Amino acid sequence: MIMDRRTFVKTAAVAGAAAVAPQVLVRTARGADKNKVVFVSEESNPKAIAVYDKINADFKKDTGIEVVVETPGFANIAKRVATLIAAGTPPEIVWYGAGQAMNLALENQLADVGDVIKATGGVAENQRMVWKGADRSVPTSQQFTYGWYRKDLFDAKKLSVPKSWDDYLKAAKALTDAPNMYGCIVPSAETGASTLLLETMFMKNDVHWFKWDAGKKDYEVALDQGDQKKRAVETLDYLNALHKFSPEASTYNWGELMSTYFSEKAASSYYVGSRLLDQTIANNPKIADATVPFELPKKITEAYYLSIQGFHILERSNVEGAKKYVTYFLKHPDLISWYHAVPLHIVPASRDMLRSAKYQDNPVIQKRMDVLKFLDSVWTKGVPLYYWDGKELNPYIGLYHNENLAGWMLAMRNIKGMKSDQIVDEAAAQVRKKMKRVG
């Protein structure tokens, strides 16, 4: 069974209400082969794949269990996993963001991995994804959402790194010489890049989509209410003002954020992690040394969208074999080579590892210790989306995040010209409608 995008999105939305509607239509899984583990990974970098091959060969030699790896990439992994599950052939392991994997937890498809976490040294509290009293994710790494800027261009204009929204707006204006150079990039499309920009800037302005109702012991939509609406409108209007010093970017996603920057069409950009630096080094090394990280400026808070990646084990699969593999992988001496596949982008979940001589023993990291020090300085400021609205895990974030509703909001404001208050009202209404539909 192959799901089209609409079917997949609907399935993802249903996951948001799994707490009240736990029965999910999934075919009975195949009989698990104890001598085989299917591992689907979001990371498709050739160097990372080479590490997988080495560890998998050692694992088969030591255990007799064969590991079959699929690397569909960031844009396709969720659909690939959904397709395998719907076909009754769920993979044993999926490595991707815990926010995406949460949908599987809500469908009661993820195994309890608390024993694996304990066996591999434990994790920080803010990195755990706990559902029904059990850990459902084994964190391996994390990526922070932050900006990158051309220090040489800023210095030439006597501009300091932006510390406030006004600073960023003034710098973007001063650096813009359209169409040759733009001061910033504000993608305005229903894409992941647009979605994470608005979600991070919402965090910077303390905007929440939901609030916790202690009486009902559940989350309810709050985006269009009181101060939340006021700050949401303010954020959209700010990004609209910033967009005047950006390419139109009406189709931009992650690739365009990088290529526009390294082709010297923008003086600043942003990314979830340092892959932008990696691609700048590869495609335009003469500006790489001047490519410097900065925190996207705060309005009220210093929080930012935190993506936590990890191993997720499917309940209806060879769970025992999968747990053996994840434990083996995390204890393998070549684990450090996996972190070095994209240096400073696949950031260890452990701060101790980030600070270790072993992790820092890499030529790219040694040359760019400024980036490592930056990451260390913002380590505690990131918040996973599912804990942004309260201490209880919010099972409803997929109703807006997985469908790039925040990206739609930016497109409506910056490309279609809709008023911000109307956009906020419509977005909140869409989420409420979805909650009723799946409830």
Image: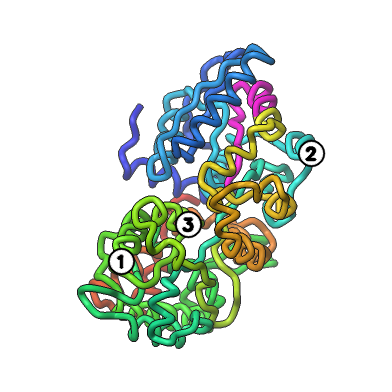
Question: Which residue has dot 3 on it?
Answer: 435
Callout 3 environment at 10 Å: few (<14), some (14 to 19), or many (20+)?
Answer: some
CB-based contact (under 8 Å), mark 3 and mark 1: no
Instruction: Identify the residue position indicated by label 2 in the image.
Output: 118
- Between residue 367 and residue 21, name the one nearer to us: 367
Amino acid identity at mark 2: Lys
Question: Which comes sooner in the sequence, label 2 or label 1?
Answer: 2
Q: Rounded to the nearest whole Å, what is the CA distance between mark 3 and mark 1? A: 44 Å
Residue 371 seen anywhere in this rendered image of the structure:
yes
Q: Is residue 38 left or right of residue 408?
A: right
Q: Are marks 3 and 2 in contact (CB under 8 Å)?
A: no
Point out the stretch of residues depicted in magenta. 309-325
Depth check, mark 2 against mark 1: the one in front is 1
- Marks 3 and 2, the one that precedes in the sequence: 2
Question: Where 19 sits versus 72, above or below?
Answer: below
Question: Which quadrant: the N terminus?
Answer: top left
Q: Is residue 313 magenta?
A: yes
As shown in the figure, which amino acid type bears the numbered disc 3?
A: Met
The residue sitting at 49% across, 36% down in the picture is 47
* Viewer-side label of 3, 1: 1
Q: Nearer the viewer, residue 105 or 171?
A: 171
Residue 44 position within the rendered picture, expressed as x and y whole percent measured from the top left: 44, 38
Q: Residues within 10 Å of mark 1 (few under 14, many from 20)?
A: some
**Residue 264: numbered disc:** 1
